């Protein structure tokens, strides 16, 4: 935060009143409200906390402010985000860790909050941002699966100087989990030591309007190096039909301390199965997904393969004790409600059907059904394991009247796994965005 405040001061001091007026002119602010009921039943296998059910209810407030830019060759501006969560219902036997609401050692907290500033500088079509960030990249995607989103701190540069090509790079140093007010460094699942340097760079190149090619590189210091190559193609047909192809490939290898026995022994290791049982990261993951869309219907099917030597990894702070930093996303087609299907050796087939009822004259109503089955999961001292998940989603946004813009959502997921407790999870979410100016 100290670095951010210094950056704000450096930007603000030279500005004239006219420049401030230009900065304010294009500013926007909104208040996003989210009311979230969370129920997770572990069925016949209680979780590590010894309880078989989590049930909680909370209200979230997210204030977003985005300024315009000052006039001139170099434009400057400032964004801000404020987050507040308020516990509405939680109690003994129904609260577990920081899965939904932060834990204070004796149970659920009554409220939790965060605030972040992001100064920004823009020259032509190149923008530098430093402060609180919500990255959405193939090598790192923030998680927004509960009441408040996960946030990262660091710097990011985005440039679109060349038509059709967007270049992105940066360095992140800290993260605050979706169920926490405490920031941490970064790690991988199973790692107990923090890294304060996540470097990334890459580009998205659009060839025509139907083909997107991507390449990204990321380094989580003392954990891993990761290369990503992606290709997305949409083939349009007549009468609103299309066929979409998505291909993704990741190559991940150890870096720094994770590449040495001493470093892994000190905590820079990955959890789960590893080929030599030593916690070293070594993984190849590829996937292909195909989606046929017609008149509101969309049918997607795909397959994903994770190599045998270790789990697929991206930043995940869930192993950092006492920080409430759990709850991370990975950029895989299989990253769903209850599982990510990213274990060593796992082969996953998946399919999803979704329908937009606007095609039937009911705008705002959408439904989806997803099924995934993973086999050949490597396990220490046991036969290969398997798991399956089924997810249902139903969303409706009121289109008119007093409650126009109010969103209602229901999510239900069922997981049966040889490695995790069986789970049956329900989420009920009410959301509304209020434009302040």
Image (spheres, helix red, strand yellow):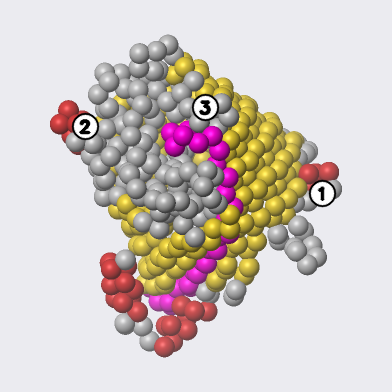
In the rendered image, residue 56 lying in the magenta stretch gets the answer yes
Percent of width and height locating residue 69: 45, 73
Asked whether the beta carbons under mark 2 and mark 3 sit within 8 Å of each other, the answer is no
Question: Marks 1 and 2: CB-CB under 8 Å?
Answer: no
Give the alpha-carbon distance from disc 1 to disc 2, as whole Å: 55 Å
Towards the viewer: 200 or 211: 200
State the quadrant of the C terminus: bottom right
Q: CA distance from mark 1 to mark 3?
A: 41 Å
- Across and down, in percent, residue 360 comes to 83, 43
Secondary structure at numbered mark 2: helix
Q: Which mark is residue 362?
A: 1
Residues shaded magenta: 47-73
Instruction: Depth check: give the residue in front, 144 or 207.
Output: 144
| On screen, residue 352 above or below 138 | above
Residue where numbered disc 3 is placed? 45
The image position of residue 247, as x and y in percent, is 50, 30
User: Considering only order in the chain, which callout, 3 or 2, is on the residue closer to the N terminus?
Assistant: 3
> Visible in this render: residue 114?
yes
Q: Are marks 1 and 3 in contact (CB under 8 Å)?
A: no
Q: Residues within 10 Å of mark 1 (few under 14, many from 20)?
A: few
Position of residue 253 measured from the top left corner of the image (x, y, whole percent): 29, 30
Magenta-colored stretch includes residue 14: no
Task: Give the residue displayed 58% in from the left and 54% down from the top.
Answer: 89
The residue beneath circle 2 is: 264
Q: Nearer the viewer, mark 2 or mark 3?
A: 3
334 horizontally vs 293: left or right: left
């Amino acid at each position: 935060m100290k670095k951010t405040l210094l950056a704000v001061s450096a930007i603000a001091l030279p500005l004239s009143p006219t420049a401030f007026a230009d900065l304010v002119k294009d500013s926007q602010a909104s208040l996003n409200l989210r009311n979230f009921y969370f129920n997770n039943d572990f069925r016949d296998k209680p979780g590590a906390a010894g309880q078989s059910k989590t049930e909680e209810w909370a209200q979230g407030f997210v204030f977003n402010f985005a300024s315009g830019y000052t006039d001139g060759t170099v434009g400057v501006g400032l964004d801000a985000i404020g987050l507040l969560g308020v516990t509405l219902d939680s109690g003994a036997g129904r609260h577990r860790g920081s899965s939904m609401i932060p834990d204070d050692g004796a149970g659920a907290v009554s409220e939790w909050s965060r605030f972040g500033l992001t100064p920004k500088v823009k020259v032509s079509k190149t923008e530098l941002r430093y402060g609180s960030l919500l990255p959405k990249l193939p090598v790192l995607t923030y998680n927004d699966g509960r009441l408040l989103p996960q946030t990262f701190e660091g710097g990011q540069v985005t440039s679109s100087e060349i038509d059709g090509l967007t270049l992105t790079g940066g360095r992140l140093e800290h993260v605050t989990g979706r169920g926490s007010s405490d920031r941490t460094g970064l790690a991988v699942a199973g790692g107990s030591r923090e890294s304060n340097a996540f470097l990334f760079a890459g580009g998205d190149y659009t060839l025509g309007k139907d083909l997107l090619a991507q390449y990204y590189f990321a380094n989580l210091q003392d954990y891993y190096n990761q290369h990503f190559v992606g290709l997305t193609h949409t083939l349009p047909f007549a009468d609103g039909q299309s066929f979409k192809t998505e291909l993704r490939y990741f190559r991940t290898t150890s870096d720094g301390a994770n590449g040495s026995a001493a470093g892994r022994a000190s905590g820079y290791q990955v959890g789960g199965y590893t080929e030599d049982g030593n916690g070293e990261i070594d993984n190849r993951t590829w996937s292909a997904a195909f989606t046929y869309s017609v008149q509101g219907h969309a049918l997607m099917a795909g397959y994903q393969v994770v190599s045998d030597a270790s789990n697929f990894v991206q930043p995940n702070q869930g192993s950092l004790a006492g920080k409430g930093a759990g709850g991370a996303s990975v950029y895989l087609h299989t990253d769903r409600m209850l599982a990510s299907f990213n274990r060593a050796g796992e082969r996953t087939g998946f399919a999803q059907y979704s329908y937009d009822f606007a095609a039937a004259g009911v705008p705002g109503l959408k439904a989806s059904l997803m099924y995934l089955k993973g086999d050949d999961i490597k396990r220490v001292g046991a036969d290969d394991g398997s798991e399956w998940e089924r997810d249902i989603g139903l969303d409706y946004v009121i289109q008119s009247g007093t409650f126009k813009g109010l969103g209602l959502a229901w999510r239900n997921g069922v997981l049966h796994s040889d490695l995790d407790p069986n789970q049956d999870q329900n989420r009920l979410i009410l959301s509304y965005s209020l434009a302040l100016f």
